[in-house]
Image (tube, rainbow, N blue to C red):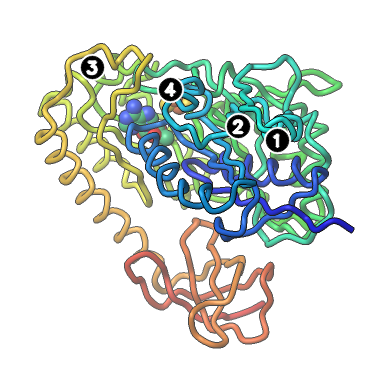
């Protein structure tokens, strides 16, 4: 028997890349690869990259620099760049980083075995096409290895929204939904392997419109069908666009099924002028109405959002509108970024806000968001939640997991195995997690 080759995958960016990294490892298994978490041991290193902000892309080039000595020490080592930087800058990577043997865009992962074979023979293999075939159809069925209690499942990819700041429509291509039958089959397989919570992924996941045998399925219909899978306890989805929060999806949150009371709904700005300049296709008021409808359906829903500060043209008054929107909603969790011009996007042509101004706004925004996050956590103290325990904690007998609201929760739970759902009474709120006591299994 030949010794297996070792694959090290480093994942940057969003959850979709986490999912893609798993699938890349599966695609390379028939070529004799097993995964390792030590880059030094690897025969193939893949960097699964993110291009969403400048910093994310620059990290790839620094990592390639750090990997150089490994290549010098092991002439058989092959290095590949995958993901959105590969898609956006394939030719530049090849020119700038001679250590790179393989470049593969996010739509071509099913071609990895062939690209790897070419790279192994000494060629530099590049594939950044948007092929007609679906990469997920062509990928091998997931093998039956046991898994942890939570998993990602990509149901939709790409985006047609063209927000003025965003590279996704260029790197991930046009919006495309996977057929419901394939998603249901993959979900059943994950559940057979121990998964109890599935997060459905898509760049614009609530624009999902998969072709079923009986016509087009919405995300609400897909979550309802997934809810019928025995053994699956929880369903989440991310990331959504406010304009695609349809009535059926909002209603699904109120039905008390397996859909969790948590929603990540990026708004980016609270200023109508900036929302228009961003091509977000909705006003601040329309966003607030969506939130009202969600809360009417599911009063305890925890809301999360993304914000960009310092978008070209943003004035202090626009920024004040963003703070006002945050005050009006009360977010339980948030991600905030300083605007970063991305080559090829419309906003990259516009005059930038001074860096000090943007830095100052980011600090003020984050201070407000932190206060809201802490308030949302503090409000959990004294309440009972259901926790899906995922792994042991730092202390003997302690387990950690997530509540329905996606809060990290730790509790003493000796003998409780990962994948168990327990009722937990929250007793304390720490910086980034909650502590509690198990009241029932
Ligand atoms: N600059 C800063 N933040 C950005 N995002 C996307 N593109 C940019 C950019 N050019 C943020 C948005 C998006 C999140 C995934 O990343 O807030 O929702
Ligand atoms: Fe990018 Fe999201 Fe806008 Fe699509 S909807 S262009 S992925 S920010």
N-terminal of the pair, mark 4 or mark 1, is 1
> Going by the image, does 403 lie left or right of 268?
right
Where is mark 4, residue-wise? 167
Q: Where is mark 2, residue-wise?
A: 102
Query: What x and y, as percent, mark residue 252?
Result: 62, 39
Q: Inspect this view and state whether residue 242 appears.
A: no
Which residue lies under the disc numbered 1? 116
Q: CA distance from mark 4 to mark 3?
A: 21 Å
N-terminal of the pair, mark 1 or mark 2, is 2
Say which label, 3 or 1, has the lower sequence index.
1
N-term-proximal mark, 4 vs 3: 4
Quadrant where the image shows the N terminus: bottom right
Q: Residue furthest right?
A: 1
Quarter of the image for residue 178 reads: top right
Q: Which mark is residue 273?
A: 3
* Real-space CA distance between mark 4 and mark 1, rounded to the nearest whole angstrom: 27 Å
Dot 2: element: strand
């Amino acid at each position: 028997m030949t010794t297996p080759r070792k694959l090290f995958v480093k994942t940057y960016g969003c959850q979709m890349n986490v999912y893609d990294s798993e699938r890349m490892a599966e695609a390379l298994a028939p070529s004799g690869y097993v995964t390792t978490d030590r880059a030094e041991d690897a025969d193939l290193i893949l960097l699964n990259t993110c291009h969403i902000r400048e910093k994310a892309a620059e990290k790839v080039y620094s990592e390639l620099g750090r990997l150089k000595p490994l290549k010098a020490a092991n002439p058989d080592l092959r290095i590949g760049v995958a993901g959105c930087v590969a898609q956006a800058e394939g030719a530049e990577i090849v020119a700038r980083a001679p250590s790179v043997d393989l470049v593969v865009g996010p739509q071509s992962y099913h071609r990895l075995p062939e690209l790897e074979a070419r790279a192994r023979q000494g060629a530099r293999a590049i594939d950044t096409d948007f092929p007609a075939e679906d990469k997920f159809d062509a990928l091998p069925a997931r093998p039956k290895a046991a898994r942890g209690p939570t998993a990602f499942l990509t149901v939709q990819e790409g985006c047609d929204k063209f927000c003025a700041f965003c590279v996704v429509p260029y790197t991930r291509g046009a919006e495309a939904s996977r057929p419901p039958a394939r998603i249901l089959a993959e979900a059943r397989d994950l559940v057979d392997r121990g998964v109890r919570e599935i997060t459905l992924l898509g760049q614009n996941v609530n624009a999902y419109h998969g072709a079923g045998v009986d016509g087009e399925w919405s995300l609400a219909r897909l979550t309802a069908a997934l809810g019928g899978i025995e053994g699956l306890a929880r369903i989440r989805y991310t990331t959504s666009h406010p304009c695609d929060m349809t009535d059926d999806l909002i209603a699904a949150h109120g039905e008390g099924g397996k859909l969790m009371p948590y929603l990540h709904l990026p708004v980016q700005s609270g200023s109508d002028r900036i929302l228009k300049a961003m091509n977000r296709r909705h006003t601040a008021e329309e966003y607030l109405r969506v939130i009202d409808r969600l809360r009417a359906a599911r009063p305890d829903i925890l809301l999360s959002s993304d914000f960009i500060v310092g978008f070209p043209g943003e004035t202090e008054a626009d920024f004040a509108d963003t703070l006002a929107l945050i005050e009006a909603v009360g977010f339980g969790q948030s991600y905030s970024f300083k605007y970063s011009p991305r080559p090829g996007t419309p906003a990259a042509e516009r005059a930038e806000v001074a860096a000090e101004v943007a830095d100052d706004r980011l600090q003020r925004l984050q201070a407000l968001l932190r206060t809201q996050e802490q308030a949302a956590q503090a409000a959990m103290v004294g309440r009972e939640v259901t926790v899906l325990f995922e792994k042991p904690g730092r202390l003997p007998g302690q387990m950690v997991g997530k509540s329905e609201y996606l809060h990290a929760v730790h509790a003493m739970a000796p003998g409780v195995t990962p994948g168990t759902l327990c009722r937990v009474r929250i007793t304390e709120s720490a910086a980034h997690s909650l502590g509690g006591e198990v009241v029932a299994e």
